[in-house]
Image (cartoon, rainbow, N blue to C red):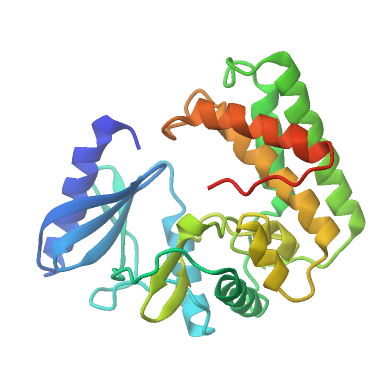
Amino acid sequence: MQASEVPRAVAAALSIASSLDLTVDDAIVLHDSNKLTLRLLPGDVLARVAPVAHHVAQFEVDLAQRLAEAGCPVAALDPRVEPRVYERDGFVVTLWTYYEPVTPLEVSPAPYANALERLHAGMRKLDVPVPRFTDRVAQAQQLVADRDRTPALADADRGLLGDTLRNLRRAIVERGGPEQLLHGEPHPGNVLTTKNGLLFTDLETCCRGPVEFDLAHAPEEVGEHYPGVDHDVLRECRILVLAMITTWRWDRGDQLPDGLRLGTEWLSQIRAALDGGGPDTPR
């Protein structure tokens, strides 16, 4: 979120929570990207705030409720208020349960894989209209092709990303493996370690595709504990995902701190992976 918008976003979240009789008078920023994640105190409310024009909040609320009902390990909405999207001053706000972190914060591979398998099992029971993973790849391809949006990307690197996205997208589709509803980005930043076990959050990136596409976002060791994985597809998905997130770092509107340094580092990882090495899972 743009820095100039943060104070208004915080004020909107506090105002909404107060109007719902939740005890809040302060906010701690937990995460700031395309939306703002806040811990509202002293009532311990987790608020997620996004500009009205750039959100899929209702989809996320509806899906979180359905997944929770299916017994999936997902973060819950705040039970003290009506589970819906609230709007104020140009922002949409959703209110979630705040989970006190437990130690160790680092998730070991086996529980990570088990939680993701349980999430996928629940997702297979749902019929939800979502984009296919290829649609997300196409968005990255469009960004690579748009020199105005990626002006700092060198021609050789632009060619590398374009070829990698196109070739691996086609290769994975042509394998014809089973596809299902996916989280879309179940990386460690979207996994909470709680006293109730591991819980997944941030469902706005859900898509349909092979489970290997989800596993490509997790640390490499997680795939070794997930049953029935096609490791050839997983390797292709890892490089594909790496190419996608590398492309986003070169977007001139990208707000990730140190993004261009990461983008340069990941380009080297893509080249190494295509030469036969395995890409490190970016954090």
Depth check: give the residue in front, 111 or 46: 111
- Asked if residue 122 shows in the view, the reply is yes
Q: Position of residue 57 (x, y in %)?
A: 42, 57
Depth check: give the residue in front, 281 or 95: 281
Q: Which residue is drawn at 65% across and 73% down?
A: 127
How many discs mark residues in the rendered view?
0
- Asked if residue 165 shows in the view, the reply is no
Q: Position of residue 90 (x, y in %)?
A: 28, 42
Above or below residue 18? Residue 174 is above
Q: Which residue is drawn at 85% across and 57% down?
A: 232
Q: Position of residue 104 (x, y in %)?
A: 39, 69
Q: Position of residue 196 (x, y in %)?
A: 39, 81
Q: Is residue 18 left or right of residue 160?
A: left
Q: Which residue is drawn at 75% across and 17% down?
A: 156
The quadrant of the image that shows the N terminus is top left
Q: In this view, does 194 lie to the left or right of 179?
A: left
Residue 98 position by quadrant = bottom left
Q: Is residue 85 left or right of residue 145?
A: left
Above or below residue 35? Residue 178 is below
Residue 224 position by quadrant = bottom right
